[in-house]
Image (cartoon, grey):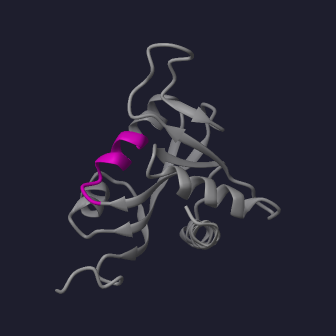
Amino acid sequence: MSAAGMVLIGRLGLGAIRTAGWRPAGVGGLTMGADPVAFAIAAASFGTEWRVDAFSVRKESKDHGTGRMIEGNFEPGMAVVVVEDVITSGGSARKAAAAVEAAGGTVLGILAVVDREEGGRATLEHEGRAVVALTTATELGLFNR
């Protein structure tokens, strides 16, 4: 959540979304890990020819207030990219994508900052989800393989 990190992730994330050919109206994912990624991408898109807004998906709906699972800039019918800080099992991305689809949105793909290479990406792709990762645990030198 450093200023420099937010700028870097915002620019790289927005670039990866464009390279993938996705044209989402929004980006978001399961709070809290996805929040800074989504907010950074939304901020990076401001002032460009194509603005992307951000939203957060709650881990569970609150029993008071609006009771919504999705907060922020999301409307039924939106095309979105679900974002993640890391993909491990793929469970967080799956939960966020299911919430978006249940609320009437369309998931264009999943964008992760880091793929930990522990099977989550393969699981998501096996389910028909397009997945893009900015880097992997191996590329970061986190594993000796």
Q: Residue at x 43, y 24 (%)?
A: 61
One can see residue 23 in this view? no
Q: Residue furthest front?
A: 2
Residue 37, image quadrant: bottom right
| Image quadrant occupied by the N terminus | bottom right
Q: Is residue 118 above or below residue 95?
A: below
Q: Position of residue 20 (x, y in %)?
A: 54, 68
**Left of 137 or right of it: where is 108?**
right
Is 109 part of what is drawn in magenta? no
Q: Residue furthest top?
A: 64
| Image quadrant occupied by the C terminus | bottom left
The magenta span reads: 88-97
Q: Residue at x 37, y 55 (%)?
A: 129
Is 94 part of what is drawn in magenta? yes
Residue 77, image quadrant: top right
Q: Residue at x 70, y 58 (%)?
A: 43
Q: Position of residue 41 (x, y in %)?
A: 63, 60
Predominant secondary structure, magenta span: helix
Q: Position of residue 11 (x, y in %)?
A: 64, 71
Q: Position of residue 79 (x, y in %)?
A: 59, 45
Q: In this rendered view, identify the residue nearer to me: 78 or 62.
A: 62
> In the rendered picture of this protein, how many numbered marks are placed on residues?
0
One can see residue 107 in this view? yes
Q: Is residue 110 above or below residue 132?
A: above
Residue 130, image quadrant: bottom left
Q: Residue at x 39, y 28 (%)?
A: 60
**Left of 102 or right of it: where is 26?**
right
